[in-house]
């Protein structure tokens, strides 16, 4: 009996001392409120495009991204055309992050004098912590207006004939700090096609990825396989290989590609270049971001003393 | 029987003693880098800290990913390229208040305190000495404030030449805590 009392006494003296030595922050971990932080995976790609395709990234909310995309002519045009550098195909565009999940954008391309607009929504976001999600899933829809003069102005022409649409699912994962991969089942719909042998709907599957080689430089590649018997034989599958270089506020993307168009309706469903024939082009994308809406944390600079 | 009561009293009183701890999960740490080219500010409003009033031991933990920048891209680069926050998710401080006896817990007021300890950022630990202020408000509120400077190179945070002029050699850090009693 006495022994057990002494033991209690001993405990009473010793326990607080033991507690004082322990990791104080661990006292918070055992608290009744479980740790509910969700860590969303960031920086799967340096920017919102792999090369031509949309990547797993969106522009952050409140941020406007001005994109200047440029493709030179085909390398196999020879020395007279300075291996393509004399020619240019452009897309100028603005992307804007509305929320963490939603990005919208507009653009104008040289190719077919196309105006385009798109909506890109993150249905699932790769995350760890309290909520674990292995992949990011994105819904992308774009609309394209060809504004070339009518080929046959005497015929009755409809505005709807100028319209193309593209819908994509982008499923991807940042596997490691350096490696991200994505799959892109895609459907392009053309309201008007060349003849009755080709289909208005073009189904394809794209793959893309990036591997970082330093903290600020990555190598990217993307490829689209168009399922057979949908488009004319003159068209080819798009293959692009690029390098992303990030310098603070800018991301430069340099690439070689067999695609002239920088919109989905073009580089998926109307791609003419053939890598084996040397119909490849140099090109670059420049991205410059502007913060239009400050994060709310920075607005309230809260300290009352 | 007397012995039992005595031992109970001692157990209870020592437990009470151990309860004199303060905590917060929503402390604020701000940092500020100022150069002629660019001013950069970031804020973290979810810093955890525990202070043991009895021993003067104090600890902080801040999630690197919780620092918010005005420019989202800067925030991404801060995590991806500078702090490597996937590898080193937290910054931590564990130290001791050396002049705890100068704080009169029963009298509301401001007390200057000296804090010594180990600051760990980007996986690198450095000994630091910081001057801070405690504001004793009442039995349920204690505020604390400190300001100090941190050199990125001390913590092996590499800054490439291309942005060297945009990032200060010394970063000013401001700590603002509002503690509540830790009851358990």
Image (cartoon, coloured by chain):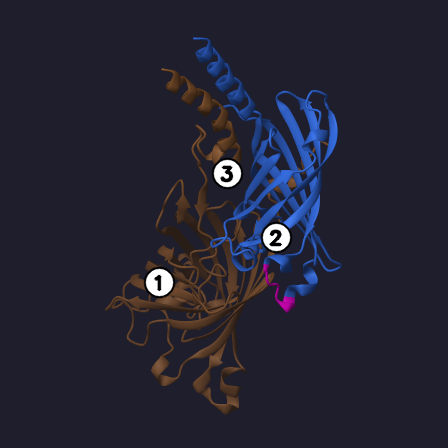
Task: Return the residue at label 1.
Answer: A192
| Chain identifier, blue in the render | B
The x and y percentages for residue B8 are 47, 15
Q: Are marks 1 and 3 in contact (CB under 8 Å)?
A: no
Residue B161 inside the magenta-drawn segment: yes
Instruction: Specify the principal SS of the magenta part.
Output: loop
Name the residue beneath numbered marker 3.
Answer: A23
User: Dot 1: few (<14), some (14–19), or many (≥20) neighbours within 10 Å?
Assistant: some
Give how far apart the Cα atoms at labels 2 and 1 are: 68 Å
Please tell me if label 2 and label 1 are on a single chain. Answer: no
Which x, y percent locates residue B121? 57, 52
Chain for disc number 1: A
Q: Looking at the rendering, in which quadrant would you find the N terminus of chain A?
A: top left
Is residue B179 visible from the viewing direction of this image?
Answer: yes
Q: Which residues are magenta?
A: B156-162
Q: Total marks drawn?
A: 3
Q: In the rendered image, what is the letter of the chain coloured brown?
A: A
Q: Is residue B46 left or right of residue B87?
A: right
């Amino acid at each position: 009996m006495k022994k057990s009392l002494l033991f209690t006494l001993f405990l009473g003296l010793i326990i607080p001392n033991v507690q004082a030595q322990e990791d104080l922050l661990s006292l918070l971990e055992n608290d009744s409120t479980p740790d509910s932080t969700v860590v969303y995976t960031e920086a799967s790609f340096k920017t919102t495009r792999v090369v031509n395709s949309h990547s797993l990234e969106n522009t952050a909310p409140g941020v406007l991204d001005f994109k200047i995309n440029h493709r030179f002519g085909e390398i196999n045009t020879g020395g007279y055309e300075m291996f393509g550098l004399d020619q240019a195909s452009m897309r100028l565009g603005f992307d804007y992050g509305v929320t963490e999940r939603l990005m919208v954008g507009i653009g104008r391309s040289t190719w077919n004098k196309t105006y385009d607009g798109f909506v890109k929504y993150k249905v699932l976001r790769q995350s760890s912590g309290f909520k674990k999600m292995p992949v990011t899933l994105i819904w992308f829809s774009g609309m394209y207006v060809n504004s070339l003069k009518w080929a046959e102005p005497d015929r009755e022409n409809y505005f709807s004939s100028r319209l193309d649409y593209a819908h994509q699912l982008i499923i991807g994962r940042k596997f490691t700090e350096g490696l991200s991969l994505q799959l892109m089942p895609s459907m392009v719909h053309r309201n008007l096609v060349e003849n009755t042998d080709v289909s208005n709907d073009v189904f394809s599957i794209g793959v893309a990825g990036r591997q970082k080689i330093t903290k600020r430089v990555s190598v990217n590649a993307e490829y689209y396989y168009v399922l057979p018997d949908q488009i004319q034989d003159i068209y080819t599958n798009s293959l692009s290989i690029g390098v992303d270089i990030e310098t603070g506020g800018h991301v430069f993307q340099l690439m070689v590609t067999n695609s002239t168009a920088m919109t989905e309706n073009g580089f998926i469903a109307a791609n003419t270049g053939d890598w084996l024939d040397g119909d490849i082009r140099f090109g670059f994308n420049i991205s410059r971001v502007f913060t239009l809406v400050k994060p709310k944390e920075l607005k309230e600079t809260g300290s009352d003393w | 029987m007397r012995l039992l009561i005595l031992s109970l009293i001692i157990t209870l009183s020592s437990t009470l003693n151990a309860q004199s701890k303060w905590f917060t999960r929503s402390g604020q740490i701000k940092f500020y880098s100022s150069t002629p080219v660019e001013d950069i500010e970031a804020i973290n409003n979810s810093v955890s800290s525990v202070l043991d009033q009895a021993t003067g031991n104090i600890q902080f933990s801040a999630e690197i990913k919780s620092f918010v920048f005005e420019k989202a891209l800067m925030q991404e680069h801060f995590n991806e390229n500078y702090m490597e926050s996937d590898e080193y998710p937290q910054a931590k401080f564990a130290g001791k208040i050396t002049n705890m006896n100068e704080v009169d817990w029963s009298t509301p007021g401001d007390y200057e305190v000296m804090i010594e300890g180990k600051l760990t950022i980007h996986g690198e630990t450095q000994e630091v000495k910081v001057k801070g202020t405690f504001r004793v408000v009442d039995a349920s509120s204690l505020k604390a404030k400190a300001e100090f400077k941190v050199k990125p190179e001390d913590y092996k945070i590499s800054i490439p030449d291309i942005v060297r002029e945009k990032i200060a050699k010394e970063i000013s850090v401001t700590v603002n805590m509002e503690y509540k009693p830790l009851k358990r």
